[in-house]
Image: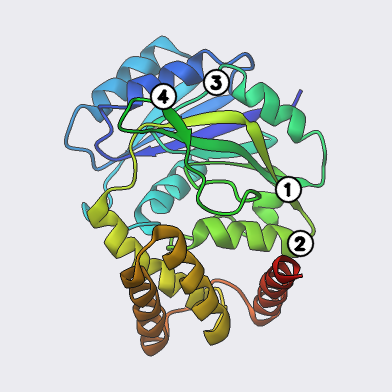
Amino acid sequence: MKKYSVIIPAHNEDKFLAGMLQTLSEQTIPASEILLVNDNSTDDTEEIMQRFATDYKNITYINHNSSKKHLPGSKVIDAFLVGYKKLKNPFDVIIKMDADLLLPVNYFEVMMNVFKDKKIGIAGGFCYEVDTQGIWKLNHPMEQNHVRGAFKAYSKECYLKIGGLFPAMGWDTADELLARYYGFEVKTLENVHVKHLRPLRAGYALKADELQGAAFYVLRYGKTLTLLASLKNAFQKRSVLVFFRLLKGYQKAKWEQQPFLVNVNQGKFIRTYRWNKILKKTN
């Protein structure tokens, strides 16, 4: 059976972290290593980490003092990368997870079976959030073959091939596009439900739209694809303002000449891949 390691960056997650760690500790196949990264928390997050690290041999934690500003993409991946460098045990699969999740008890048993197929580079379940009536409902707004950034598992070979994760908005799109560029497949499992305890905050979402627009630029989408992607995103969110925030973010990134996340050949592959998907949907 393949071995897996989990890294969980956490900033002020004392309301959710204990529940998440409890579901991890109850997995039918335990992790080789669970590394918690306390990212500049000011609540009881570290106390919870310390308690679980004392009770479970495969759980450890470290403190990381990053910026207090919660920037979508960069902050959480910075913390993840700090944790990655501190891993001690060998692994075949590396998992990045948020601290506000609840997992089914056999989650990683299923994932490890998926990764028996060497073509699979990235895998994950489907995201569910509770509605106003207290009912857990599917909230997987992107395409069905996309794994949410809150819970992404990578084969070690794929992770190294794509160059790890990028501390920037769009990292959880870049990783899948690059995985496909290098010949790996992305696998989502519709019957594996992950409960997400905290929906995206409104203020965070406003900033995230502009940063997502910037991501279109650094992933080399180009103007036409960016327009189409922005229209699609705005339609999904039922908001014209989203469309303009995305375009604003793209244009700002272009003016600032933000560094690209992918090279020219990878950008060409990404555009071709996106156009092929669009054409398939129109046929």
Name the front one of labels 4 and 1.
4
Looking at the image, residue 228 lies above or below residue 3: below
Q: What element carries label 3?
A: loop
Tell me the amino acid under the disc marked 3.
Pro
- Residue, x 73% and y 60% (percent of image)? 180
Distance in Å between CA atoms under marks 4 and 2: 33 Å
Closer to the N terminus: mark 2 or mark 1? 1
* Contact between labelled residues 1 and 2, with CB atoms less than 8 Å apart: no
Distance in Å between CA atoms under marks 2 and 1: 11 Å
Residue linked to disc 1: 157
Closer to the N terminus: mark 4 or mark 1? 4
Tell me the amino acid under the disc marked 2.
Tyr
Tell me the amino acid under the disc marked 4.
Met
Residue linked to disc 4: 20
Mark 4: few/some/many CA within 10 Å (<14, 14-19, 20+): many
Q: At which x and y percent is residue 268?
A: 69, 80
Residue linked to disc 3: 104
Name the front one of labels 4 and 2.
4
